[in-house]
Amino acid sequence: MLQRAPLKSTANKIINDIFVLDLSYEELKNKQVPMELEEKYYSIIIAGIENFVLYINEYTNLELLELDRNFGSQIKEQLEKFEQIYMLQEQLCERIICIYGDSENEVLSIIENLETKIKNLKIENMNGVLFKGSTEKGIFKIKQSYSIARNSWKVAQENYWEISPILTTDGKSENYTFFSYDSSKIKSAIRSGEEEEILNELEKFYKKLGKGYINSYLQWIMIFSNLYREIIQLPEEVGVKVDDIIGNPDLLLKEMMLERKREIMMNNLRAISSEIGNEFKKAGQGRQKDILNKALTFIDDNYYKEDLTIGDVAKNIYVSSSYLSLLFRKELGKTFIEILSDTRMEHAKNLLLNTNLRSYEVGEKCGYSNPSYFSTVFKGYYGCSPSKFKKKS
């Protein structure tokens, strides 16, 4: 079994690359697929709602979205009970799932167990249903397994299905394609707080929606609302409630759905994403100030150490030396050495004014073991040597 987290993570990433990104074996070779994964058994299954197409016209678009959320939460609850399951794709009242294990029997046992649980689901007055693909040895055969699962689905639906599914076939082979997007890039842009980057990523998303992958408005709002749900969760990462930014998110989504105009919906999403991005930007600025204050405090507490380095400061406040150096230049317009020298000279001046210590003793207490060098630096700051400064004062 895949008990090691790193291996499981690798398996899920490769499955995604093969199935969603449609990478070839040659392209995947550069990713160094572990032999252990190539030796395992894989199967694709499609979880759905039994005879869903018989009921679809009884629901409004908003009701269908709510139905899908209910279905999705129940499926997720069941999948969390298994270690070797990876969710490949979420579509309207349908989930495409990959199961993998060390043997064919192990995979079949998981499928049998999962099938029982899914069939017992209750989604309003409907039951869950499972369409099974073949169980194949080798990670590169998951598409073959998927085509069998999809054909089983088509046979069950062919007398009723009037809406083209997102998944389509080219009519010549069993190579299926479907709309997919990487929401992590959009979320990363929002976290950056850079509005231009946010709008660019959303524009890529919108353009991809118009490239023939989407066959109905219903499919479009399903994809749109899924992204919307992901985006409105982001403010929690910086301790902000989404309601404080955009009001009631569910009510806002309903209002957007009622518009039934894609460009208006996208404009709303752009505005929402920019507002949330601004919260990340403000939080980032606050964090920078906090880091800067901690760094300056550490320097002030340790300025007397002759060998004090920026690495010592960075390590103490858990940031990299390069980041801290950039922060000093950006916020203070100074290097670490300049800041350290400023601190040492300020303390040296106070010691000369308020104690009877000799110049070389002051230098030693401020991190300078060489009296001559201390005198040179001090003169550069105050225009005279430490001894003359003390006499003048």
Image (cartoon, rainbow, N blue to C red):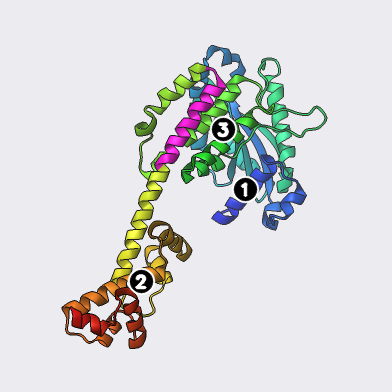
Q: Which residue type carries mark 2? A: Leu
- Give the answer, above or below, for where 11 lies relative to 173: below
Does the image show residue 106?
Answer: no
Q: Which residue is mark 1?
A: 13
Span shown in magenta: 260-279
Name the element at disc 2.
helix
Q: Nearer the viewer, residue 96 or 179?
A: 179
* Residue 174 is a magenta residue: no
Q: Position of residue 237 (x, y in %)?
A: 41, 44
Going 65% across and 27% down the picture, which residue do you hit? 210
Going 68% across and 41% down the picture, which residue do you hit? 21
- Give the answer, above or below, for where 50 lies relative to 131: above
Q: Which residue is mark 3?
A: 116
Going 67% across and 49% down the picture, which residue do you hit? 103
Name the element at disc 3.
helix
Query: Which mark is nearer the camera, 3 or 2?
Result: 2
In 3D space, how far apart are the residues under numbered discs 1 and 2 (Cα atoms)?
46 Å
Within 10 Å of disc 1 (Cα), the crowding (few <14, some 14-19, many 20+) is: few
Q: Nearer the viewer, residue 60 or 52?
A: 60
Say which mark, if any, is on residue 326. none
Going 45% across and 21% down the picture, which residue do you hit? 254
